[in-house]
């Protein structure tokens, strides 16, 4: 860990000190102190990340893997060090198993387009769950339509937990080739029993991929302990920059997969007759990568580790559970999703007002939540809501901000009637 | 706060709660579905012609926020009995009310003078750029229904 990424240290989770690391949290919105409850959509950035990115551009920037000159080497070292940071962050056995992508969406598309096209055919089955973000649905639909495979969906119960008996049923005939599910639901907060689900998949010969977007920023992730085959997440949700994310895959799988896009950076040798490709991860990284962003992501993960992932989880759980309790007590509020294992996300509706109207009204009180379908239409259908309002929490949120949210909902009731 | 009160006027809240002409028209001459992919709001607009070049009946169904529901509801009232050409001109005026800062919502063209009050109700959305599409979606969907298109979208 570099000294720069060390957050100002604090016993007993000093949330005020953490907040001082995030310049944007000091700003006002409509004359009110910002209450940012939309970390699930994208997290704010600590100055450690901003500084790391500025430093690269001011001091070491150059293209990577290409030049013999000093800067190219220095920048390549930083870029590859960030890859090692990602590997350590999710306990991947080797840094060479980390592929840079633009985010989780590209990681999922990459696996569908490369592993999928090479391994999936008519009659095979891809299994996802009802809780998926559209980015873990659509790539598999495209693969299904191209290959004649079948796409099956694990249902969820009224609490928002996946139905493991139904899941076992989808695996039983051995036709499932891959299971791809989210670690934590971005729309209603359910934490899926990944370890158990992965074991069940492996018992029936299927591979297991995890969309870790909503888990990586909030809890310790150990891909080896989880026993999965692919894991991915987005940099911008882990307090890092946009335009960067990571895919982890088991080495043997990555080695056997065909390349993704063609271009520079991914080739070993090119003639007009034939090109040969570099080994993983480089064969999946055509073109000049997001160099500055990769370094920024490395700094973000260092930051998370310095705060402490168990401490973050404990703090966020405390704030999110407080939010559930307070919101449930607001007349007309209905919380959607009551899984026993749940992340720092609370989705709700209000009898009096549509989530959109809630979002607009509380925005004027400085409170930012997401209102809509959260890129998860099937979840909205399952719970028979057109949309929800969603408060999602990050390592910098406080219970007093939950109070501000609840106060702002008062204004909604004021306008729409109680 | 004033901007919020201006947006959520009593008329809008009333139409949002008790939308008028909220029903299907089984023998519609035109219908279209509109959706706002951003928020998932959906509206289904039905148009029945009166046989003399006018709009005999306009109705809608769907689910959405107070703004889009109220806008659809008020739209059905504004449109009934008009000629197609009038209806399209009214859409232009409505669009200007919702989006054009320079347009004085009380200064509507003479032919729509009687509707000035009902039109200006939506002017509040100007202060909420993210919500303009909520107000205009029903109208876009209505135009699609007139044009014989099956769908409209805000994107
Ligand atoms: C669970 C989940 N998966 C995937 C994504 C897509 O991430 P990105 O848009 O960064 O690729 C998101 C982001 O909203 C998400 O919450």
Image (cartoon, helix red, strand yellow):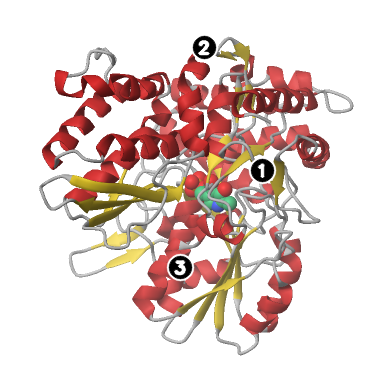
Can the viewer see residue A172 in this picture?
Answer: yes
Q: CA distance from mark 1 to mark 3?
A: 29 Å
In this view, the mark in front (3 or 2):
2
- Please tell me in which quadrant of the rendered image residue A353 appears: top right
Q: Seen from this angle, which residue lies furthest bottom?
A: A173
Pointer 3 with pointer 2, Cβ within 8 A: no
Residue at numbered disc 2:
B2
Q: Return the chain for callout 1.
A: A
Foreground label between 1 and 3: 1
Q: Is residue B45 above or below residue A162?
A: above
Badge 1 vs badge 3, beta-carbon distance below 8 Å: no
- The residue that label 3 is drawn on is A140
Rendered residue at 41%/59% (across/down)? A283
Q: Residue at x 43, y 31 (%)?
A: A70
> Label 1 belongs to which residue?
A348
Q: Kindly identify the residue that appears in the image at 71 percent across and 21 percent down.
A: A19
User: How far apart, in angstroms, are the residues tagged by discs 3 and 2?
Assistant: 48 Å
The chain holding disc 2 is B
Where disc 1 sits, the SS reads: strand
- Quadrant of res A238: top right
Q: Is residue B52 left or right of residue B140?
A: left
Specify the subunit that label 3 lies on. Answer: A
Location of residue B84 in the rendering, given as x and y in whole percent from the top left corner: 14, 42
Q: Using residue A201 as the reference point, say whether residue A287 is left or right of it.
A: left
Residue A241 % position (x, y) = 51, 34
Does residue A281 appear anywhere in the picture?
A: no
Q: Position of residue A167 (x, y in %)?
A: 67, 76
The relative height of residue A305 versus residue A246 in the rendered view (above or below) is above
Quarter of the image with the N terminus of chain A is top right
């Amino acid at each position: 860990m570099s000294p720069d990424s060390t957050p100002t240290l604090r016993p007993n989770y000093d949330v005020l000190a953490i907040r001082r690391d995030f310049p944007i949290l000091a700003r006002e919105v409509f004359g009110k102190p910002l209450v940012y409850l939309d970390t699930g959509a994208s997290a704010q950035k600590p100055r450690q990340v901003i500084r790391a990115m500025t430093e690269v551009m001011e001091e070491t920037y150059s293209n990577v893997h290409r030049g013999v000159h000093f800067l190219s080497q220095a920048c390549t070292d930083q870029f590859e060090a960030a890859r090692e940071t990602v590997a350590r962050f999710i306990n991947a056995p080797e840094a060479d198993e980390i592929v840079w992508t633009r985010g989780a969406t590209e990681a999922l598309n990459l696996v569908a387009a490369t592993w999928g096209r090479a391994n999936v055919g008519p009659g095979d089955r891809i299994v996802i769950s009802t809780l998926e973000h559209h980015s873990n649905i659509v790539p598999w639909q495209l693969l299904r339509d191209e290959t004649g495979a079948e796409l099956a969906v694990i249902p969820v119960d009224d609490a928002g937990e996946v139905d493991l008996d139904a899941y076992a049923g989808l695996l039983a005939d051995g036709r499932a080739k891959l299971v791809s599910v989210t670690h934590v639901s971005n729309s209603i907060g359910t934490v899926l029993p990944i370890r158990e689900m992965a074991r069940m998949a492996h018992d029936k010969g299927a591979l297991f991929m995890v969309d870790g977007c909503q888990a990586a920023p909030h809890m310790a992730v150990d891909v080896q302990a989880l026993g999965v085959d692919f894991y991915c997440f987005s940099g911008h949700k882990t307090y890092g920059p946009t335009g960067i994310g990571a895919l982890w895959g088991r080495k043997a799988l990555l080695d056997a997969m065909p390349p993704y896009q063609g271009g520079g950076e991914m080739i070993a040798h090119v003639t007009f007759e034939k090109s040969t490709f570099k080994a993983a991860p480089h064969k999946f990284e055509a073109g000049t990568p997001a160099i500055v962003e990769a370094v920024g992501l490395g700094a973000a993960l260092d930051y998370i580790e310095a705060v402490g992932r168990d401490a973050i989880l404990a703090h966020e759980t405390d704030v999110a559970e407080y939010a559930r309790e307070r919101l449930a007590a607001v007349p007309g509020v209905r919380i959607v999703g009551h899984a026993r294992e749940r992340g720092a996300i609370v989705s709700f509706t209000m009898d009096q007002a549509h989530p959109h109207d809630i979002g607009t009204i509380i925005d004027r009180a400085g409170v930012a939540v997401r209102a809509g379908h959260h890129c998860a239409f099937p979840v909205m259908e399952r719970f028979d809501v057109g949309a929800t309002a969603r408060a999602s929490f990050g390592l910098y949120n406080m219970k007093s901000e939950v109070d501000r949210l609840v106060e702002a909902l008062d204004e909604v009731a004021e306008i729409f009637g109680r | 706060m004033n901007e919020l009160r201006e947006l959520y006027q009593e008329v809008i809240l009333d139409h949002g709660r008790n939308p008028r002409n909220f029903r299907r028209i089984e023998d519609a001459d035109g219908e279209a579905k509109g959706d706002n992919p951003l928020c998932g709001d959906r509206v289904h607009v039905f148009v029945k012609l009166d046989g003399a070049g006018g709009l005999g009946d306009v109705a809608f169904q769907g689910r959405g926020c107070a703004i889009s529901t109220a806008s659809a509801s008020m739209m059905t009232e504004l449109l009934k009995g008009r000629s197609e050409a009038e209806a399209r001109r009214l859409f232009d005026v409505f669009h200007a009310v919702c989006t054009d800062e320079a347009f004085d919502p009380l200064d509507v063209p003479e032919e729509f003078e009687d509707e000035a009050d009902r039109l200006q109700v939506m002017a509040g959305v100007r202060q909420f750029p993210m919500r303009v599409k909520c107000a205009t979606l029903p109208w876009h969907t209505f135009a699609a229904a007139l044009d014989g298109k099956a769908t409209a979208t805000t994107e």
